Amino acid sequence: MVLTKEYRICMPLTTEEYRVGQLYMIARHSLEQSGDGEGVEVVENKEIEDPEHGKGQYTEKRIHLSNRLPYWIQAIIPKIFYVTEKAWNYYPFTITDYTCSFIPRFHISIQTKYENNSGTTENCLNLTPDQLADRLVEHIDIAYDEVAAKHYKEEEDLKFFRSAKTGRGPLVEGWRNNFQPVMCSYKLVYAYFEVFGLQTKVEDFIHSCIREVLLLGHRQAFAWIDEWIDMSIDDVRKYESSLQQQTNSLLRDSTSPQGAEIQSDISEGATLPGSPKSPVQSPAKKGYFNWF
């Protein structure tokens, strides 16, 4: 059985404001987490159109994260592999899929809908009765849920933060039901990992990672509001494009001789310790998921 959760994350923003803040935050995160041959490689970023959802944006990225996995996963995977992220953004509805270069039975699918409310829509994503029966709903409070100590910054603590430009904040207890404006990100997450003996453990781990990233990213999107609130959608797209070029440049420039030797071995068909008999076919990239 695939572990399915619906995360609901409220923000003290309108959905149109969040659209800009989300793009700003993702672009900035990707750049900050790139370097030393690691980070997010943007493979494709283009405008698209869908008969049902209208115009949107498609992005494809490659993300390497082997060094960030717990030891019990690192023990069964090669040191070099990547996760492919494909995202279709038809705001206020988005679809994001993740697959792994090494594990064909690994798949994460995320459907997201953004609404101007406090998380009160019970079937925002139009699930079937069977899907509703399997779904677990989890609310994330960006101000009062504890962020990991390694990520904590006093200036991003929303219990004390106040925006100079908008006057919003600090967020007091119960803010989601009393604050205006308020919007909610509804995220239906399917985590699938069909490997005998590891499925439940890995799917639980995936959801714990997703929850941590959602909490941190949404906290920072609001804590950084004074940096993006004056941007238009065109402004933030230009910012996004500029940072993607910098990110890809960092990845190219920071490739070490050792990494080049490893990649040469892979291209010649060598296998890595702990890997299957077939060679890994692609270079390593590491970075930040676009789970927002």
Image (tube, helix red, strand yellow):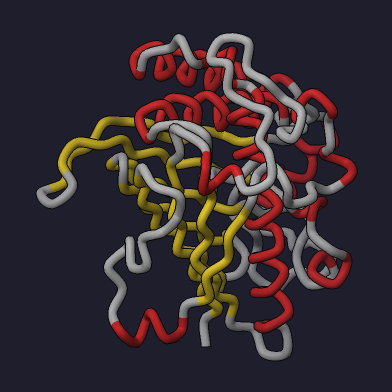
Residue at the limit of the structure toward the left, as seen here: 51
**Residue 21 rendering spot, x and y as whole percentages:** 49, 26
**Residue 33 rendering spot, x and y as whole percentages:** 72, 31
Q: Residue at x 37, y 35 (%)?
A: 15
Left or right: where 231 falls relative to 30: left
Residue at the limit of the structure toward the front, as seen here: 178
Q: Residue at x 51, y 56 (%)?
A: 8
Q: Is residue 25 above or below residue 67?
A: above
Location of residue 16 by image quarter: top left
Q: Is residue 169 visible?
A: yes
Q: Residue at x 47, y 77 (%)?
A: 135
Between 289 and 121, the one lying in front of the other is 121
Q: Residue at x 79, y 38 (%)?
A: 259
Left or right: where 17 falls relative to 80: left
Between 254 and 141, the one lying in front of the other is 141
Location of residue 120 by image quarter: bottom left
